[in-house]
Image: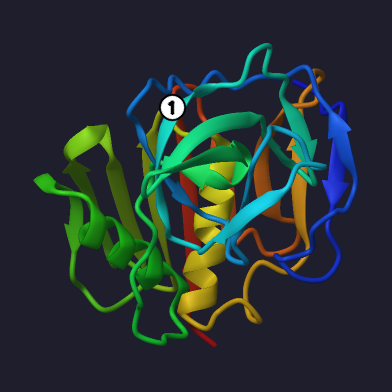
């Protein structure tokens, strides 16, 4: 499938286009009344009195704050804020009801504080093991010889059909986390948070490209040079892959 457009971000992962445009795409995330949503906007999310950017701001919800989804607004229309697609939804926050743009909310748990590390792959592995219940570990390949024949590969299966694949060679390793029933931008916001709290945001994620299909929907986000971060829509799931390289 050819791209209809490829958006290139120069600078850091946190580059955020200011244009707000209407979009016909609607992810249909399958939310129902009573679903718990979590704020994934690092700078907070405005809770408004009415479902419009012109409405009074009740309060600014902090990153990680929890709310209860009460339903879509009548004739809710999806629109884009930067590259994030969402719509106005009705929510309850500790007994206060209002409206938020749901593109910056997710049912994914936010990452806890991680040890500072220079090793990208360990960040994603810690998040998976710290937030999902491990059900099974499968050894796909194992050779512990410390030379170019070295190869270790594991597959971890967690609850909620979450999977983590670890694949290491002599000079490189990759971690791929597959999470079902999320939007690709949910994964993007998670990656931003992981890099921020582990102090890796200045090292990784520079110059990401957003690949879009003919309908204008993003299906892949990746580093255009090193591809040490790849976020991809793979159908009913979204995969997040971190890669690390060692050697001379």
- Quadrant of the rendered structure where residue 157 is? top left
- In the rendered image, the quadrant that contains the N terminus is top right
- Residue 90 vertical placement versus 56 (above, below): above
Residue 70 in the figure: left or right of residue 113: right
Front in this rendered view, residue 112 or 206: 112
- Residue in the picture at 50% in, 56% down: 190
Can you identify the residue that label 1 sits on?
Answer: 70
Q: Secondary structure beneath disc 1?
A: strand
- Residue in the picture at 68% in, 11% down: 75
- Quadrant of the rendered structure where residue 203 is? bottom right
Question: Residue 233, how many percent across, how many down?
Answer: 55, 32
- Residue 156 vertical placement versus 225 (above, below): above
The tally of labels here is 1
- Quadrant of the rendered structure where residue 226 is? bottom right
Residue 215 in the figure: left or right of residue 164: right
Question: Residue 116, how many percent across, how many down?
Answer: 41, 87
- Residue 18 vertical placement versus 71 (above, below): below
Which residue reaches farthest top?
A: 75
Front in this rendered view, residue 171 or 187: 187
- Residue in the picture at 48% in, 80% down: 246
């Amino acid at each position: 499938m050819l791209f209809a457009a490829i958006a290139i971000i120069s600078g850091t992962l946190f580059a955020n286009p200011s244009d707000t445009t209407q979009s016909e795409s609607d992810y249909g995330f399958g939310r129902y009344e009573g679903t718990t949503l979590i704020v994934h906007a690092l700078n907070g999310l405005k809770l408004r009195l009415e479902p419009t950017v012109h409405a009074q701001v009740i309060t600014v919800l902090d990153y990680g704050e929890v709310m209860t989804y009460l339903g879509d607004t009548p004739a809710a229309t999806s629109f884009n804020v930067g590259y994030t697609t969402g719509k106005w939804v009705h929510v309850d926050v500790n007994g206060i009801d209002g409206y938020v743009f749901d593109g910056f909310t997710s049912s994914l748990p936010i990452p806890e504080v991680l040890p500072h590390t220079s090793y990208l792959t360990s960040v994603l592995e810690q998040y998976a093991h710290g937030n999902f219940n491990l059900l099974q570990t499968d050894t796909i390949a194992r050779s512990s010889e410390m030379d170019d024949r070295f190869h270790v590969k594991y597959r971890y299966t967690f609850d909620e059909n979450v999977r983590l694949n670890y694949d290491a060679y002599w000079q490189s390793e990759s971690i791929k986390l597959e999470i079902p029933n999320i939007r690709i931008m949910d994964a993007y916001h998670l990656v931003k948070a992981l890099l921020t709290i582990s102090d890796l945001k200045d090292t990784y994620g520079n110059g990401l490209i957003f690949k879009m299909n003919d309908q204008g929907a993003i299906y892949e986000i990746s580093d255009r040079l090193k591809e040490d971060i790849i976020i991809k829509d793979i159908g009913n799931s979204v995969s997040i892959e971190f890669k690390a390289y060692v050697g001379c």
